[in-house]
Amino acid sequence: MLSFPPREQCGHPWVKEKCPCGHTVGGIFHKPVKGFAEVDTSEDRTERGYILGTPDSRSSEAERDLPAASVCLARALLHSSMLLGTFTDRQSILNLMKKKPEVAKKFFQDHLEKDIAFLAESLGRNRDDATITVHLFLSYLLEVTAGKKMMVKSMHKKEDRIEWESCFKTLTQSFFQRLNEKLASAKQQIVEEAHSSGILKTADGQRLPFGDLPSTGLIDKPCMWRFEQRMTIQHLTHVIQQESETSQFPVLLQILSK
């Protein structure tokens, strides 16, 4: 008589065990014990509505298959929309939430500031750059969807959510590949505006007259005002995730994910 091991992750019971409550669970040879019913696992069991909690309880982490920087962008758009909604239809926004905040406007503003801080951390940049990045992403969305018929799709099944996350990941990866170029261009436009501050112009390398201040000090040195990009674990993870051949660094990605 031949016996074969069960197929891994098939979802059917193979052994019996005792539950802490005293009942027998599981089954033998794919036959469940009496009282068990088949469950549809295609349904997405992710909680509905807004469930992120308070701003202080959050951390900068990837969400399922989405990289941390992509999650930051998605949540920045989410909280911007919900913040705007508190001015136009506050009750509808509150109906989406498990726990209602005392001051909804401040709640979403604090969340948005947290999104910007986490995005800056992931990109290895300052918060001004992260704020500009959100604006550039909005512009990018308008650009890639121009002339296309868009529709709202409800995500009732797990496959629907996975498909959305995959599309959003592809979209953000394409955006991040040209971010440095677009960010440099946007910052240059800001510097060239007539009302830009002297500090911005100095950080860009322009020498400005500072009146009676000595010209031999540090105040007119660009390095004193310029934010230098830092390499953090979050930034390193983001850089590697943008590589077209991430399979070259499987061990490093595994370590960084921990």
Image (spheres, rainbow, N blue to C red):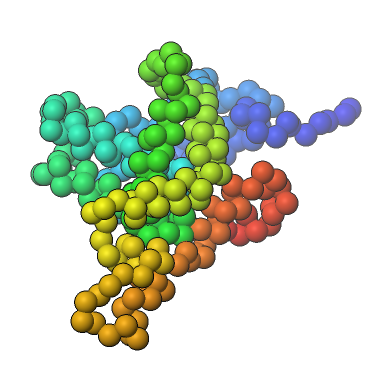
The residue located at (39%, 71%) in the rendering is 222
- Viewer-nearest residue: 213 or 234: 213
- Taking the view exactly as shown, the residue that stands out farthest to the right is 1
Q: Is residue 203 visible?
A: no
- The quadrant the N terminus occupies is top right
- Viewer-nearest residue: 250 or 17: 250
Q: Quadrant of residue 79?
A: top left
Asked whether, in this view, residue 18 is left or right of residue 110, the answer is: right
The percent position of residue 154, horizontal first and vertical second, equals: 39, 19
Q: Quadrant of residue 11?
A: top right
Q: How many marks?
A: 0
The residue located at (62%, 27%) in the rendering is 12
The residue located at (45%, 52%) in the rendering is 184
The percent position of residue 40, horizontal first and vertical second, equals: 50, 20
Asked whether, in this view, residue 150 is left or right of residue 200, the answer is: right
The percent position of residue 157, horizontal first and vertical second, equals: 46, 21
Q: Is residue 173 visible?
A: yes
- The quadrant the C terminus occupies is bottom right
Above or below, 48 against 102 in this view is: above
- Viewer-nearest residue: 58 or 188: 188
Above or below, 159 against 251 in this view is: above
The residue located at (33%, 29%) in the rendering is 48
Asked whether, in this view, residue 128 is left or right of residue 251, the answer is: left
